Amino acid sequence: MNRKIRLTVNGTARAVEIPTYRTLLDCLRNDLGLTGSKEGCGVGVCGACTVLLDGKMISSCIALAVSADGHEITTIEGLAGDERLHPVQQAFIDAGGFQCGICTPGQVVSAKALLDAIPNPSDAEIREWMLGNLCRCTGYYKIIESIRAAAQPSRA
Amino acid sequence: MNAFEYAAPRTLDEALAVLGEHGDEARVIAGGTALVTMMRQRLVRPSYLVSLREIAGLDRIEAANGGLRLGALATHREVETSPRVRERLPVLAETFRRVASVRIRHMATVGGALAHADPNQDPPVTLIALGARVEIRGASGRRELPLEEFFRDYYESALEPGEVVTGVVVPSLPAASGAAYVKFLPRTADDYATVAVAATVSLEPDGERCRTARIALGSVGVTPIRARAAEALLAGQRVGADLLRAAGESVRGAVDPLSDHRGSAAYKREMAAVMAGRALTQAWDAARASVRGTR
Ligand SMILES: Cc1cc2nc3c(=O)[nH]c(=O)nc-3n(C[C@H](O)[C@H](O)[C@H](O)COP(=O)(O)OP(=O)(O)OC[C@H]3O[C@@H](n4cnc5c(N)ncnc54)[C@H](O)[C@@H]3O)c2cc1C
Ligand code: FES
Ligand code: FES
């Protein structure tokens, strides 16, 4: 039971034929070759697979690709400009917001969504927004610092 | 996951027709957070999925008879951040805010929170304490049920095959009332509750005695549970700290928790009494404060 679906992925129209049971994460990684989004838990808990669906962050591991038919997806690959990293990406590098990197695409996409929704978040707002993105390496402080720096470079 | 057919109709009537045609084999999908997880784990294998996501207007949050109506497709995040909900029933916005993470709240829907009928979910607890009614549509028409009658057993609701939850209607609280939601979750902030309690208290016009109270609990039985004995202890009474504590203690008789990785049945019963006392105290204090505010 295959289906042809149309997605706008990082601003580009894509058409792809997939089985109905394909998760959005597998579709992005295997059918569209966008392997930046990771699978950590596969059950919505860890945030490694975070992408934006029509601008809202979701777990792509528990989303069906067919449900995204006709909608817009933003992945980690869509954040940087031609020669320039997205400010959140740059801040994660500058402030040391990652170590092994497996959680990082999800952290960065979630942080971008946060700054889109709340351009200058308080620490409490950063913590509440990011609590669904798990990281086994950084101890979280550096991630919060990175987001603070991206929001307001002077405060970092 | 198993193979299945997928339809994303644009109207409710079409969705009902497809559901009717495929009977037990078909399943509704909304946010997909519970259903896709269960399908990935091969706990369910529907052969037909009918998505509600492309039906316009099913996500509306609107005023209704002085209260609120939440459309089935409204996401948890939309309820949490709705200015209308925050103004009229802040306890409801706060309850939805306590579900999982922002990311999951962008996906999970009001209808899914009810139809999934997991007794560990947050929204049903507060909605029962507020006296909400669930709206159901099927091929043969529409019906409405008090939400507390909707939950029948572990993951089992009053929905018949082919029926869809279209929304939930929540009456507003009378004047001189207070409400509180207490979610006890000692493990992590995005966990399901170990014990959850919602309470509402309405005062007599004198502002001194309790007219009515409603208490509902989650995670302490196979369905959300309403603690009527505790409510009866408070109705008509001049309430003080001792009576609030006694009412909290009385929920021990109403709950029937299961032992699991969040705690033993005995521990949850103990915590249910403590948390019920706290929720009632908060609701009482809020009711008293609302009276002082208007005088
Ligand atoms: C990691 C994680 C953590 C979570 N933590 C919490 C928590 O702490 N507290 C909490 O309350 N919830 C929590 N949830 C959410 C909750 O468990 C359910 O996943 C969610 O409420 C289901 O909503 P949905 O719209 O995604 O439903 P779906 O997954 O689409 O559907 C769930 C079930 O309901 C049926 N259904 C859905 N909508 C309708 C409708 N309108 N009419 C008829 N049937 C319908 C489906 O057929 C299916 O059987 C969590 C979920 C995840 C993934
Ligand atoms: S892989 Fe999707 S939330 Fe963990
Ligand atoms: S950087 Fe290793 S898990 Fe986050």
Image (spheres, rainbow, N blue to C red):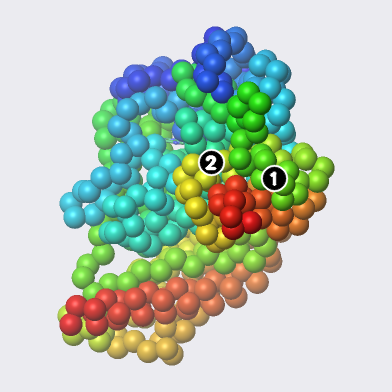
Indicate the quadrant where residue B143 lies.
top left
Q: Is residue A87 left or right of residue A137?
A: left
Relative to B173, B28 lies left or right: right
Measuring from the top left, give residue A128's x and y in whole percent. Answer: 56, 56
Residue at 61 percent across and 35 percent down: it is A86
- For disc 2, the neighbor class at 10 Å (few under 14, some 14 to 19, many from 20) is some
Q: In the rendered image, is residue B29 in sight? A: yes
Total tally of numbered discs in the picture: 2
Q: Position of residue B68 (x, y in %)?
A: 27, 51
Q: Earlier in the sequence, mark 1 or mark 2?
A: 1
User: Which circle, 1 or 2, is nearer the viewer?
Assistant: 1
On residue A113, which mark appears?
2
Q: Name the image quarter holding the N terminus of chain B.
A: top right
Residue A28 percent location from the top left of the image: 65, 22
Which of the labelled discs sits on residue A92, or is there none? 1
**In the rendered structure, which amino acid carries the disc numbered 1?**
Phe
For residue B246, side relative to residue A64 (left or right): left
Q: Is there CB contact under 8 Å for labels 1 and 2?
A: no
The amino acid sitting under disc 2 is Ala
In the image, residue B255 sits, relative to residue B273, either above or below, namely: above
The residue furthest right is A100
Q: Residue at x 64, y 30 (%)?
A: A84
User: Up-down: is B205 above or below A8?
Assistant: below
